[in-house]
Image (tube, coloured by chain):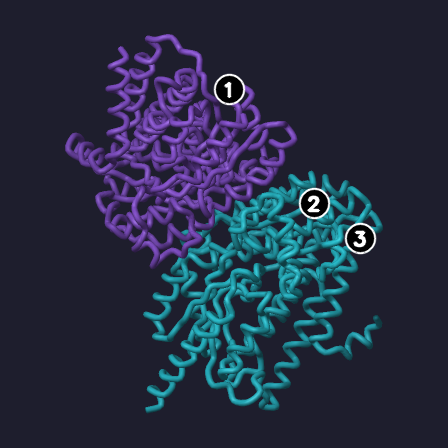
Chain colours: A purple, B cyan
Amino acid sequence: MEQNVKTLLEQFRTIAANPKKAVEDHKAETGKGAIGMMPVYAPEEMVHATGFLPVGLWGGNRPVSKARTYLPPFACSIMQQVMELECDGAYDILDAVVFSVPCDTLKCMSQKWKGSAPALVFTHPQNRGLEAANRFLEHEYAVLQEKLEEVTGVKVTNVALEQSIQVYNENRAVMREFAKLAAEYPQVISAVDRHAVFKARMFMEKSRHTALVRELMEAVRASDPQPWMGKKVVVTGILVEPDGLLSLFDELGLAIVADDLAQESRQVRVDVPEGDEAPLYRLARVWQNMYGCPLATDTKKARGPMLQDMVRKTGADAVVVAMMKFCDPEEWDYPIYHRQFGEWGIRDLMIEVDQEAVSFEQARTRLQSLVETL
Amino acid sequence: MSVKQLSQMSAKELLAYYQAKLDEEARQAKANGKLVCWSASVAPPELCVAMDIAMVYPETHAAGIGARKGALDMLEVADRLGYNVDCCSYGRVNIGYMELLKEEAMTGKTPEVLANSPAARVPLPDLVITCNNICNTLLKWYENLAAELDIPCIIIDVPFNHTMPVSEESKAYIADQFRNAISQLEVICGRPFDYEKFHAVRQQTQRSIAQWNRIATMSQYKPSPLNGFDLFNYMALVVCARSRDYAEITFRKFADELEEKYKKGESAFKGAEKNRVAWEGIAVWPYLGHTFKTLKNQGSIMTGSAYPNIWDLTYDAEDETLHSMAEAYTRTYINTCLDNKVKVLRGIMDRGKCDGVVYHLNRSCKLMSFLNVETAELIQQANGLPYVSFDGDQTDPRNFAPAQYDTRVEALGEMMDQAAQTAGE
């Protein structure tokens, strides 16, 4: 059974590292292409309903050179990577790219797309408490759907959309369960592996991903959880990459017992609500129900209390803030929850995330001193 | 100040007079227990002004602090609170200022930094209103103000117009938010909304904007009676008083003065204007004089900038659906697709008869920087005019190097001279 866990984790790692192969396999198998999904949130269910493969475009780990022509150094690291990949033609195997624009950088990126596939842009409303916002977003989605139908040549029926919503809600529930399981079995699921399971989600048809994650969870549960001698942390931010940075957690015995990362748990935080309303409207409601993300405007700033709750429920020893370099929405949230943590007696440590990085000595020193002082 | 005395003032005097008066009104309001609102610069003031709420504009306030060389002290306070130096410097200056006011309110003692600051004294707000038509940073910044001060935050969200013209759905959503803001204000103020005054305020806003636009048209003349950098100064009133007659009175006077100048054949430029440039981006407030003088010294006058033009908020004040007002507040050129942005800038360059463009790559403003390369290329393809870009910042003096600016502007001057020479041959 232990061998089975290893094989399955290896499978997730391979998929996570080979998005191009995922696209090619999907094409060979279904005859249908792939649609790029730019960070951070989009109604992926709609793409799934066309039978095309939604593929997450969350940067990479290349040296940035060509992107320098189009982006100044103070653009966030993930968008520098995306721009580099655009310039390299890495996204030209896609049939279209879905762009949401919840920050100023993404607004600009949506207008300077260098790939050959068309960019399909939509805007999230930010006055999210209002019913008018739901209606506006429903309309944005209807326009997006038309554009997708044009690109894919597939009519998105309500029946297909409802089926896709079911597939996605199921996958989100399974991933929430997986995050809890990973917290119970840090000896079995390393920080790097935990990330691979989440990342593979971006390149797999979701019902297959669900099935594979279930298989993994069953294999892991075959053994009893063991007491963890290291420390436990909650991570918050956009993402923790590259693997070199994540492996520091493993080396230093820091178990990630929960995450609030845009690339990981924020993607599975909110389900499409059930109800009699049309599927597009219910997809729009997801944005209204989203919480704890700096891109979803919240004048009550519920992120701090949410993280406090995560720490309490998981018994974490500290919160590690994985600060994406030059991500201003994240940077604006930090002073508020950092102050709150101080008031609540929660330890926190900020490390910088740069996807281009190859050396992690600074992060190592910081994380090491965190471990020593916990 | 009597009416007679006001009528004798020059536009420049009126500008200074009303700016000081607005700050004083805010201080008086606070002292008398009336409400004070801090507002984003292009958020609709019509709603709060209709409810007689005193308004303070943190961006203008921060720009003023920057221009008076007082930004660093405020930035250091924000630094201590954990604000990253990569965040917008307007926001950081304002957060620093807010923190000092808060400390003063809590301890009864004025912090030394605040006492020594050249910043105009403004009171803490009882509520804030924000609008993301010029950036989404204004959502984050105002979220934080509301959280730090535990006060209500009114949001007017104007979705990014990835396609132009503005969709009917977007207008309907924004107009609904105006109505929602009205009900928020009724609760905050504890009295019914004054719809009659709201109507009058919309009409006043349109009269102010009409005079603002009249000033901008003056740069069409050659030589220009208007120095474009003056718009950066007068902008303070289009931001802070467009819903009051203060702006209308001042702008009318300024436009009259410019018309008079034009009739007399006088130019804003002392000596012959050699070439005319467009300025894309926010001013470098701590170095406003330097940026202006470098251009001036080489014979260049600025006759076109889309930045002050953001406040061309022309709408139908009689439209009770408020869709027209919604459209005006969402169509700001940086809240639209690249095609429209280029169209707006080109129009400004054409009207200002510009010979080249200076692009400000502003460390504080991602939205006004990250499309500069594409914008510059598209505009040059269309009109063939030279351009340069320099690194700067609206209020953090550490992010601007005068030498780099001078070299770039000189290069632009040479390119424009060359083009003029070629055209003359």
A167 lies above or below B200? above
Q: Name the residue under label 2.
A: B127
Q: Report the residue marked by disc 1.
A: A314
x and y percentages locating residue B185 in the rendered image: 70, 44
Q: Which chain carries label 2?
A: B
Q: Can residue B368 be seen in this view?
A: yes
Report the mark closest to the observer, 1 or 3.
1
User: What's the amino acid at mark 1?
Assistant: Thr
Q: Are marks 1 and 2 on the same chain?
A: no
User: Are labels 3 and 2 on one chain?
Assistant: yes
Residue B223 position, x and y percent, is 52, 85
Position of residue B204 relative to residue A334, above or below, is below
Circles 1 and 3 in contact, beta carbons < 8 Å: no
Q: In this view, does B395 lie to the left or right of A58?
A: right
What residue do we see at 56% from left, 45% from top?
B140
Q: Tell me if residue B216 comes above or below residue B282 in the rendering.
A: below
Residue plotted at (36% across, 61% down): B374
Q: Is mark 1 on a helix, strand or loop?
A: helix
Q: Tag 1: Cα neighbours inside 10 Å, few (<14), some, or many (≥20)?
A: some
Which quarter of the picture shows residue B14? bottom right
Amino acid type, label 3: Ala
1 and 3 marks on the same chain: no
- Residue A199 in the image: x percent, y percent? 33, 31
Q: In this view, does B68 lie above or below B172?
A: below
